Image (cartoon, helix red, strand yellow):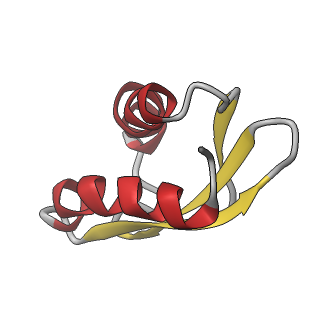
Amino acid sequence: MLTRENLEASLQKLRPFLQEDEGDIELVQIDEDGIVKVRFLGSCNGCPLSSMTLRAGIERVLMKDFPSIKRIEAVN
């Protein structure tokens, strides 16, 4: 079930990989239509590879854990 708590638990599994490079991620919002908004922190904020990290890593894992997610969006 897609809840803030469950999504935070999944993000906790991903955080160590981001933190290795002095970055992090923050859950901002879960829309009713299945769009999850996140914010990159630290060195991930503004990194030219952050869009690839979002699609190939974070989105792939979260959409596998929660099939009701339609899309992950990064916000500032």
Rendered residue at 83%/49% (across/down): 31
Rendered residue at 75%/40% (across/down): 35
Determine whether, in the image, residue 43 is placed left or right of residue 65: left
Q: How many marks?
A: 0
Q: Residue furthest front?
A: 1
| Closer to us: 30 or 50 | 30
| Closer to us: 44 or 68 | 68
| Closer to us: 60 or 18 | 60
Residue 37, percent from left and from top: 68, 53
| Image: 48 above or below 18 | above
| Image: 58 above or below 25 | above
Residue 25, percent from left and from top: 44, 64
Q: Residue furthest left?
A: 20
Determine whether, in the image, residue 44 is placed left or right of residue 20: right
Rendered residue at 59%/44% (across/down): 1
Quadrant location of the C terminus?
bottom right
Determine whether, in the image, residue 16 is placed left or right of residue 38: left
| Image: 54 above or below 46 | above
Quarter of the rendering containing residue 24:
bottom left
Residue 62, percent from left and from top: 46, 37
Residue 9, percent from left and from top: 39, 62
Determine whether, in the image, residue 40 is placed left or right of residue 75: left
Quarter of the rendering containing residue 48:
top left
